[in-house]
Image (spheres, rainbow, N blue to C red):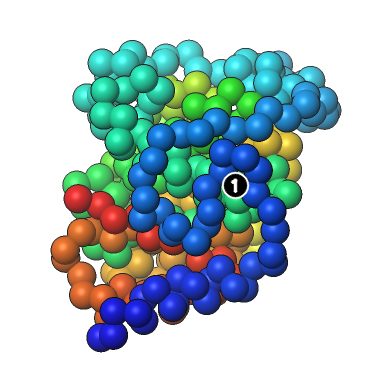
């Protein structure tokens, strides 16, 4: 295959987006995550006071300030730095700065692509098998949560892999598929603290056999819309099963604003990568994450 084909596919994605200006210290999305450079800092925003909800049982505070109240999100069992390292979860001050900078770069570019939207959703799907498929999606969410003015939510929609339980510090029960099947189940019952400050998670649930049909439902769309509206400053990462092995990723694309694909380095041909890229809406495709 012509070496320029994959580049042209990426370029086409960017051309679908409107022209815009980027703040000082922000990366140009044309880089497509291929460069790793030190984090340059992000422009501070004024406090955004918004009424969210009045419940006080460990869920989002009733008065919300993006620089203060997010720190009050329940996290009863925070991971220590040693525990984060053991689970390969990124955190500020970690020894491997190159890895941390790479995830910061992803965070910056996703914000750039979101334009003026303070809350947005990103679909992540890998193109091959890995030891813990959800770890990359979790680390993307952790990178957003490391910003004290932003919260993150990981919605695991891969019911065929149980890797999320290894990354979360509290036991989890009901999740996405349970919520869709049970109209009486409130959203707060499927949201769990992760062990990382300002990062919450929703597990896939207990009904993997019906996942395709459940993810296609109107209640799934309503769930994502409700989650996006809960906080004025939140990034939602939707983790899907491996793209080349299932149909869920194509279904979940409709609920996301952006799409990122994880590529196992050296295991796929350029033709295979390009075929996968072209399967998604070019206006949503935001780049590739190459995994060692």
State whether residue 21 appears in this view. Answer: yes
In the image, taking residue 169 as reference, residue 155 lies left or right, namely right
Circle 1 residue? 111
In terms of image quadrants, where is residue 41? Answer: top right
State whether residue 189 appears in this view. Answer: no
- Asked if residue 154 is positioned above or below residue 284 in the image, the reply reads above
The residue that appears at 64% across and 59% down in the rendered structure is 221
Given residues 102 and 193, the one toward you in this image is: 102
The residue that appears at 28% across and 85% down in the rendered structure is 2
Given residues 106 and 21, the one toward you in this image is: 21
**Quarter the N terminus occupies:** bottom left
- Asked if residue 4 is positioned above or below residue 59 in the image, the reply reads below
In the image, taking residue 286 as reference, residue 132 lies left or right, namely left
Given residues 128 and 3, the one toward you in this image is: 3
Q: Position of residue 114 (x, y in %)?
A: 64, 53
The residue that appears at 56% across and 39% down in the rendered structure is 25
Is the residue marked by circle 1 packed among few (<14), some (14-19), or many (20+) residues within 10 Å? many
Q: Residue furthest bottom?
A: 1
Q: Position of residue 63 (x, y in %)?
A: 79, 20
- Asked if residue 231 is positioned above or below residue 19 in the image, the reply reads above
In the image, taking residue 118 as reference, residue 8 lies left or right, namely left
Which element type, helix, strand or loop, lies under badge 1? helix
Given residues 166 and 237, the one toward you in this image is: 237
In the image, taking residue 20 as reference, residue 80 lies left or right, namely left
Q: Position of residue 231 (x, y in %)?
A: 70, 35
Q: Position of residue 181 (x, y in %)?
A: 56, 53
């Amino acid at each position: 295959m012509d070496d320029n084909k994959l580049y042209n596919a990426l370029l086409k994605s960017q051309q679908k987006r409107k022209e815009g200006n980027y703040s000082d210290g922000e990366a140009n999305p044309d880089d497509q995550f291929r460069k790793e450079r030190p984090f340059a800092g992000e422009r501070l925003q004024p406090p955004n006071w918004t009424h969210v909800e009045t419940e006080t049982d460990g869920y989002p505070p009733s008065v919300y300030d993006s620089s203060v109240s997010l720190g009050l999100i329940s996290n009863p069992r925070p991971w220590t730095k040693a525990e984060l390292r053991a689970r390969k979860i990124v955190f500020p001050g970690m020894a491997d700065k190159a890895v941390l900078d790479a995830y910061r770069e992803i965070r910056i570019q996703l914000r750039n692509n979101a334009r003026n939207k303070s809350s947005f959703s990103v679909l992540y799907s890998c193109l091959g098998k890995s030891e813990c498929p959800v770890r990359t999606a979790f680390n993307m969410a952790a990178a957003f949560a490391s910003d004290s003015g932003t919260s993150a939510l990981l919605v695991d929609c891969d019911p065929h892999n149980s890797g999320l339980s290894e990354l979360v510090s509290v036991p989890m029960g009901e999740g996405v598929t349970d919520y869709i099947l049970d109209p009486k189940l409130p959203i707060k019952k499927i949201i769990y603290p992760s062990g990382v400050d300002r990062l919450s998670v929703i597990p896939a649930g207990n009904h993997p056999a019906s996942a395709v049909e459940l993810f296609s439902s109107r209640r799934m769309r309503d769930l994502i819309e409700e989650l996006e509206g809960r906080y004025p400053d939140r990034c939602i990462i939707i983790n899907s099963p491996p793209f080349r092995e299932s149909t869920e990723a194509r279904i979940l694309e409709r609920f996301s604003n952006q799409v990122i694909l994880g590529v196992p380095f050296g295991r796929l041909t350029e033709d295979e990568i390009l075929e996968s890229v072209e399967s998604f809406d070019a206006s949503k495709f935001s780049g590739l994450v190459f995994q060692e």
